[in-house]
Image (cartoon, helix red, strand yellow):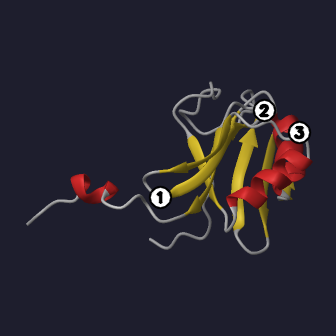
Amino acid sequence: MKISDRYPIVVTEHKVACRDFWQKHFGLDVLFDSDWFVLLGDAQQGSVVAFMSPDHPSAPPGPETFGGLGLCLEIEVEDARQALADFQASDGRVDYPLSDEPFGQRRFGLRDPSGLWVDVVEQIAPQQGYWDRYMQTV
């Protein structure tokens, strides 16, 4: 199987608010937009995320309206401090403060208008020995 694109579709009643949020705070481009569906991304990465109204007849089987639980969109950045400053400069609300995690990430978190949890991370060195307890020995 050759994958030509990939992106999650979040079913939400807040399609327009989500589109505007992702454009404003993350600089994503609208790749496709209609009254029931919006696809966001950029020229370098392609599609990143889509939002779809729950009442459109083309909805695939299974996706109920997203309730904000059980899904995290991870966004890796080179500099989480700068990403946080940029996000807050555009009036973004942070739900998890910038933290250096012992497992090797500097991150902050937020929710978009659909309730989607967004984890903005920078890879950093883990605390020495942190992963030792999780490594399998042969």
Disc 3 + disc 2, Cβ < 8 Å: no
Picture disc at residue 35: 3
Q: In the visual, does 70 lie left or right of 114?
A: left
* 2 vs 1, front mark: 1
Q: Secondary structure at mark 2?
A: loop
Q: Earlier in the sequence, mark 3 or mark 2?
A: 3
Q: Earlier in the sequence, mark 2 or mark 1?
A: 1
Find disc 1 in the rendering and name its residue. 104
* Residue 99 x/y as whole percent: 60, 46
Nearer to the camera, 21 or 123: 123
Residue 45 in view here: yes
Q: Residue at x 75, y 32 (%)?
A: 56
Amino acid residing under circle 1 = Gly
Q: Position of residue 24 (x, y in %)?
A: 90, 50
**Nearer to the camera, 97 or 53:** 97
Q: Nearer the viewer, residue 110 or 80?
A: 80
